[in-house]
């Protein structure tokens, strides 16, 4: 599947806010949004007011970029959310937070979701004692995600864990720093998923 391989700061600038796609760098003065607070491109500083459709599209693109998901896969998540009980927009975000790569990031094993996806694809993690290299693996309450014994000395993971405390641990995840294991305790509520998104706009976009 195709993946965006261009500058990540460009994506944040396009959305006009920090999406924290580069980990620690996003918290420094080197952040692209801090240095150039306008959209990228030749006409970035002259863009006018967005239409209702434009606002809906930007919100959808923002969520896609935060989780690193391509359009077709994102649409499938939306369709699945629309068939489940609950508010569609909230269920959509809950499905995205249940992804294995999202949980790996939340537990502090990776500095950002892109790095977490790469670590998962390289087979560094176990889910309930079994190897899993599928970033989109949906976790269920009670699932345990652990680092493989052979991966505990991985320098990327070690560096991320050393600075993960500044991000804090979400309430729906428990983490054992000694055993390097985390438990997906429960599905988070919308209030707990602290993302700068208006998911209702995405629902409106796909409901047309």
Image: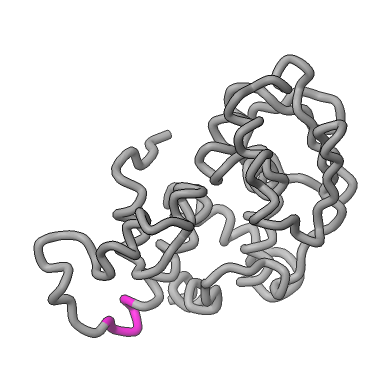
Q: Would you identify the image quadrant in which residue 65 lies?
A: bottom left
Taking the spot 21% from the left edge, 61% from the top edge, the residue there is 40
- Image position of 9 (left or right of 163): left
Q: Find the residue positioned furthest to the front.
A: 29
| Closest to the observer, 158 or 135 | 158
- Quarter that holds the N terminus: top left
- Image position of 45 (left or right of 120): left
| Closest to the observer, 71 or 41 | 41
- Image label count: 0
Taking the spot 69% from the left edge, 75% from the top edge, the residue there is 87
Q: Position of residue 165 (x, y in %)?
A: 70, 51
The part of the chain drawn in magenta is 50-54
Q: Position of residue 116 (x, y in %)?
A: 59, 38
| Closest to the observer, 55 or 181 | 181
Look at the picture and state if 117 lies above or below 59: above
Q: Would you identify the image quadrant in which residue 133 lies?
A: top right
- Image position of 144 (left or right of 147): right
Taking the spot 47% from the left edge, 70% from the top edge, the residue there is 206
- Quarter that holds the C terminus: bottom left
Look at the picture and state if 112 lies above or below 117: below
Say if the magenta span includes residue 187: no
What secondary structure do most residues of the magenta stretch adopt? helix
């Amino acid at each position: 599947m195709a993946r965006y391989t261009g500058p990540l700061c460009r994506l944040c600038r396009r959305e006009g806010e920090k999406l924290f796609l580069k980990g620690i760098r996003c918290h420094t003065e080197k952040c692209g949004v801090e240095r150039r607070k306008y959209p990228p491109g030749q006409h970035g500083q002259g863009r006018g007011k967005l239409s209702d459709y434009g606002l809906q599209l930007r919100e959808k693109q923002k969520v896609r970029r935060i989780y690193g998901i391509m359009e077709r896969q994102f649409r499938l998540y939306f369709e699945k959310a629309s068939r489940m009980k609950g508010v569609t927009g909230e269920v959509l975000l809950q499905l995205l937070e249940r992804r294995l790569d999202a949980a790996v990031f939340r537990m502090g094993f990776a500095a950002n979701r892109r790095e977490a996806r790469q670590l998962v694809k390289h087979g560094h993690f176990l889910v309930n004692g079994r190897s899993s290299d599928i970033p989109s693996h949906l976790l269920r309450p009670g699932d345990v995600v652990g680092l493989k014994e052979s991966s505990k000395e991985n320098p990327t993971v070690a560096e991320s864990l050393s600075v993960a405390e500044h991000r804090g641990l979400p309430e729906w995840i428990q983490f054992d720093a000694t055993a390097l294991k985390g438990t997906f305790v429960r599905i988070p509520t919308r209030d707990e998923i602290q993302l700068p998104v208006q998911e209702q706009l995405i629902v409106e976009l796909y409901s047309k």
